[in-house]
Amino acid sequence: MNHRLSSMYLLIVVVTLVLLMTASVAAQAPVSSGKAPAPAKKWTAKTPDGQPDLQGYWTNSTYTPLQRPQGVTREFYSAQEVAQVEKQAAEREAEQTEPGTIADVHYDFTQFGLDRSQSTHTTQMRTSMIVDPPDGRIPPVTTDGQKRQADRAAERKRMGATTDQVQNMPVGTRCIVMAGSGPPMMPAGYNSNYQIVQGPGYVMVLTEMIHDVRIIPLDGRPQLPGNVRQWTGSSRGHWEGDTLVVETANFNGKNPFQNASEDMRVIERFTRVDADTIDYRFTIEDEKTWTRPWTALLPLKSSTGPIFEHGCHEGNYGVRNTLAGARAEEQRAAAAKKVSK
Amino acid sequence: MKTVFRSSIIVTAAILAVVLIAPVAFAQTPAAAQAQPYRAPRTADGRPNLNGIWQGMNEANWDLLPHAANFGRVVALGAEDAVPPGIGWVEGGEIPYLPAAAAKKKENYDKRLTLDPEIKCYLPGVPRAMYMPYPFQVIQSKDVIMLVFEYAGAVRTINMGKPTEAPADSWMGWSNGHWEGETLVIDSTGFNDMSWFDRAGDFHSDELHVVERISAASPDRLNYEATIEDKNVFSRPWKISMPLYRRVEKNMQVMEFKCVEFVEELIYGNLRKPGTQPPAH
């Protein structure tokens, strides 16, 4: 556990690389006609108090990228293409590092069972999670959005290197919030595990990473007042037939999803389609950032418990060691400079 | 006449005797010894319904034992940091530490400004999570009962199925629950040795075993008790008990208290690059 967490910072770098590489591998896959799998038998189970039953352990681990890779024009791959994409991505993950980047540091995902190929993941034929716009890409960014993106980049530069102070580090490294919590709930590099529990009037979603819990009230209450902003926003839900619809707003803007503004609204739709699958789709509305709303679809696949306690902050040796290492390097460089004079 | 008078005195005396004695006799009947216990409303699957947002409105998080008001630890915080007085929640008014553990508790107390895990936003452990000055929500389903705490976003999953063993030690432990009539009984083990019971340095080892009993006392009040056992630290099991109250505010919700951000400068500030300043907040 400690070992696992001590490499957190490095791991996030590796995960980012892997995700980028997965997309490029997918882009190289051969093109042939593909079809979506046939819809499974309708799921009708209810909880004792009559809610459609979404309960259980789930994962959204997947090799499907958010955006359709450049060069791919179709909505679906063939089964052979998907197998090839996943195989190549798994091989990449097993190799871990890209020469010339962090090749002198060894981190083996498979050693800790963190490799996606070692646990349940969703295989879908889609070439992207994004289903709308139909090109599978995030829509064009507004002028406001571009300015905000530039301002944020300038501010990051002004703040200095990520190793200068903990506050410059990514929020995931700092164990504040990770991609899995969202909303929208996106696959993390590993441990993309969830538990859903329903009680009277509520749906609870526990995200394994950082033990983030969303308690979604179903009683039609208003959102929190507009000045109350949270990392994971404020979620309100209701049932539309057998679909749980959750609207989330009141984000604090400190962990912007795809560089959204803090006025982003996320509308999630959870529909259990069979014993093993929840159809999870989300729509992002943020007219300050994008020229139109956009929608993505990724299945939650039934998994096995338990959810382990992810005491991320409590075991965060990664931040401490990274900062301490940077200070030691500065001192060494200063000493060398002194000697050379 | 005289006989009648005499008879009526006897009758009156008899009636008085019955009236006076009956309550005493009644009180001695075990079934009627107390008022009828409160019966909680039922969930759709017939269990006592403990769903809701609850909070122990007391000062146990400062010190489980009876204590007078006291100085705080940070001069600049003045009365905000002063220790509020508390009536005490430990049965018998004493925590039965083994001799070495008593010394360790004293050391914890003396160094509490740097050692209390709450200061670093660490997970609170059990039973401390149940009486921290933050609300928590009970979400009951048939197979599991979730306890979701506002403080640090801590969470406990109570397995209501066949008891299972902890796969690894953790801050919040591994909990198996079952119903005994009106009472939810939670048996927890699998703890690490890093959480405390309060800000006064009361502590445990990884042998901690907690058995909690929770039942509804009224629509808006739970009776909570926890029996604490740890052969490395205590000479015998000991028990705390307290009410937990429902947070009845309209649209009450457990909000986000991700305190990591608030403690980063405290924990890592000594490692910042010389000349840099923390961002304004």
Image: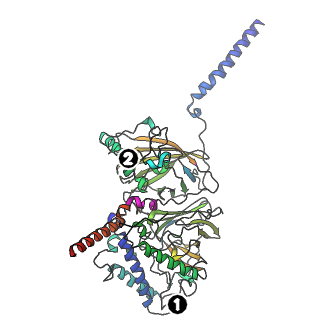
- The one nearer the camera, B89 or B184, is B89
Q: Is residue A303 above or below residue B89?
A: below
- The one nearer the camera, B19 or B208, is B208
- The one nearer the camera, B174 or A94, is A94
- The one nearer the camera, A316 or B190, is A316
Q: Residue furthest top?
A: B2
Q: Is residue B122 shown to the viewer in this render?
A: no
Quarter placement of the N terminus of chain A: bottom left
Provide the residue span drawn in magenta. B246-268
Same chain letter for marks 2 and 1: no
Please provide percent x and percent y for residue A3.
32, 66
Q: Residue B203, labelled with which disc? A: 2
Is A192 left, or right, of A271 in this rendering? left
Q: Residue furthest front?
A: A341
Q: Is residue B235 shown to the viewer in this render?
A: yes
**Residue B29 shown in magenta:** no
For badge 1, the amino acid type reads Arg
Q: Secondary structure at mark 2?
A: loop
Q: Is residue A142 above or below residue B20?
A: below
**Residue B265 shown in magenta:** yes
Q: Residue at x 41, y 61 (%)?
A: B265
Colour scheme employed for the rendering of this structure? rainbow
Q: Residue furthest right?
A: B1
Quarter placement of the C terminus of chain A: bottom left
Q: For residue A322, which quarter of the picture?
A: bottom left
Please provide percent x and percent y for residue B34.
58, 34
Label 2 is found on which chain of the structure?
A: B
Closest to the camera, between mark 2 and mark 1, is 2
Q: Residue B225, labelled with which disc? A: none
Q: Residue A74, labelled with which disc? A: 1
Please provide percent x and percent y for residue A291.
60, 83
For badge 2, the amino acid type reads Phe
